[in-house]
Amino acid sequence: MEELDLQKLKEVDIKDIPLEELVDITDIKIDPNLPKEEKILEYIKQIKNPYCYKYKNFKVKVVFNEDENAKTLEECLSDYIKNL
């Protein structure tokens, strides 16, 4: 998959995709014995769009913050739990 293709997949608006067209991440099966590069390719092949998929009946959109000073997921979750 080329970088241009990944950019197009990244820009997809998940609201425009019917739930039944998304791949359920629980259906993805990767052979743990494959080399890392082949695991990645197999995952992309099965998930079709690594930025948009479903988990059971929920749509999931993966977004990365490109700001190098942004908080990590762990920091965000920790802050959230502290403020409960």
Image: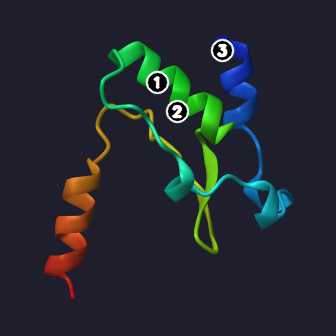
Q: Quadrant of the C terminus?
A: bottom left
**Image point (85%, 58%), residue name:** 16
Left or right of 37, for residue 79: left
Disc on res. 40: 1
Left or right of 29, for residue 8: right
Quarter assignment of residue 35:
top left
Left or right of 8, for residue 34: left
**Image point (24%, 66%), residue name:** 77
Q: Residues within 10 Å of mark 3 (few under 14, many from 20)?
A: few
Name the residue nearer the viewer: 51 or 71: 51
Residue marked by disc 2: 43
Quarter assignment of residue 68:
top left
For the residue labelled by badge 3, is the local secondary structure a helix, a strand or a loop? Answer: loop
Q: Residues within 10 Å of mark 2 (few under 14, many from 20)?
A: some
Q: How is the image coloured?
A: rainbow
Q: CA distance from mark 2 to mark 1?
A: 5 Å
Seen in the picture, residue 41 relative to 79 is either above or below; the reply is above
Residue marked by disc 3: 1
Q: Residues within 10 Å of mark 1 (few under 14, many from 20)?
A: few
Mark closer to the chain start, 3 or 2? 3
Q: Are marks 2 and 1 in contact (CB under 8 Å)?
A: yes
For the residue labelled by badge 2, is the local secondary structure a helix, a strand or a loop? Answer: helix
Seen in the picture, residue 19 relative to 27 is either above or below; the reply is below
Horizontal and vertical percent position of residue 23? 67, 52
